[in-house]
Amino acid sequence: MCVRYTLHDVNEAIAVIAMALARKLIPPPSWVDPRYNITLTNTVPVAASGSGGAEIRGMRWGFIPTFQRKVEDLRMWPNAKAEKAQKSPTWRDATKHRRCLVPANGFYEWETVGSMKYPHLFTLKDAVPFAFAGIWEPAGDGLPETFAILTTQPNSLVGKFHDRMPVLLPADRMARWIGADTLEDSVFAELTQPYPPERMAEREVSRYLNKSSNQGPECHGPPEPRNLKKPDSEPQMDLGI
DNA sequence: CCAGACGTTGTT
DNA sequence: GTCTGG
DNA sequence: CCAGACGTTGTT
DNA sequence: GTCTGG
């Protein structure tokens, strides 16, 4: 699952999208603060087609299908499987007509050891910003625009930690993804392939990240030492009884 | 994803 | 809204 | 026809 | 243990 990501260089990430789309894209000044720990329900900058072409809008992460908008049963979806997005009633219309680019600098996956959770940061090589392949749902019923990030099979790097990974779009794929016209099956399949692992980097970061209200650069601090209370070489002392 | 809450009644 | 199961 | 589901991930 | 909020 991809439910946390970082957008800590908003201007640069949006500049990459603007370059790829040959558009002038201006993020509202209130959104340019670094966000190292974005998660569900957060409102973030997203590039989507507007009346005058691509633009940056604030959308809430957590796709709420129009048919589920009953106040007593509001469920939101962080991800949609690329393998099902074109056919499923939940995702199909958005996949055909409301594809967006979600600017990012990296995303996180966790390694569980016993009861401890150790976060890992995944980026592109050389820390190049990229976009997640997103789909969005219109505002209505008092709800804002919401979006989901597509997932696909993991590559060998992400696969060490999880069995899914988000669909990553580098600059040369952005223009083909965004838009309101249905993609050819072959184009959709190509764009949603797992990103090549040799073009990515991974490193463990501080558990400060685990708390989703922590949004600062400390999230990328060095990992804390792991508690080695049971070295294999030393037998545990018998505590008796 | 992880962290944190998870309950009732009556009174303010 | 749209599809599936009965 | 109507009723009910429609989703993801991780974990078991 | 399980649900909710971020």
Image: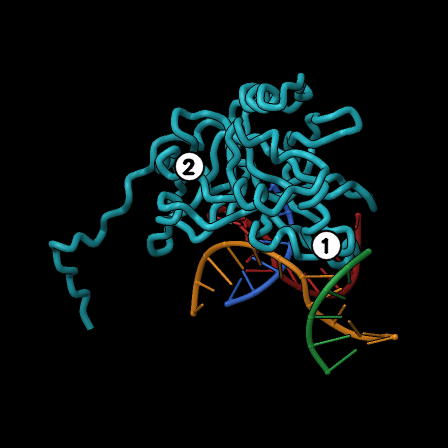
Chain colours: A cyan, B red, C green, D orange, E blue
Q: Chain of mark 2?
A: A
- Do dots 2 and 1 share one subunit? yes
Q: Residues within 10 Å of mark 1 (few under 14, many from 20)?
A: few
Instruction: Report x, y in % for residue B4.
Output: 54, 49
Type of residue at label 1?
A: Leu
> Where's the C terminus of chain A, which quadrant?
bottom left
User: Quick one: A66 or A43, which is closer to the camera?
Assistant: A66
Going 74% across and 58% down the picture, which residue do you hit? Answer: A73
Going 61% across and 47% down the picture, which residue do you hit? Answer: A185
- Residue A32 position by quadrant: top right
Instruction: Report x, y in % for residue A153.
Output: 46, 50
At numbered mark 2, what does the secondary structure look like: helix, strand or loop? Answer: strand
**Does residue A66 appear in this view?**
yes
User: Quick one: A218 or A19, which is closer to the camera?
Assistant: A19
Left or right, A113 with respect to A213, comes to: left
**Which residue is the site of mark 2?**
A122
User: Quick one: A5 or A46, which is closer to the camera?
Assistant: A46
Type of residue at label 2?
A: Phe
> How far, Cα to Cα, is label 2 from label 1?
31 Å
A31, above or below B2, in the image: above
- Residue A137 position by quadrant: top right
A22, above or below C6, in the image: above
Going 13% across and 59% down the picture, which residue do you hit? Answer: A235
User: Quick one: C6 or A38, which is closer to the camera?
Assistant: C6
**Which residue is the site of mark 1?**
A74
Left or right, A29 with respect to A222, comes to: right
A232, above or below A140, in the image: below
Q: Nearer the viewer, mark 2 or mark 1?
A: 2
Instruction: Report x, y in % for residue A133.
Output: 58, 39
Q: Residues within 10 Å of mark 2 (few under 14, many from 20)?
A: many
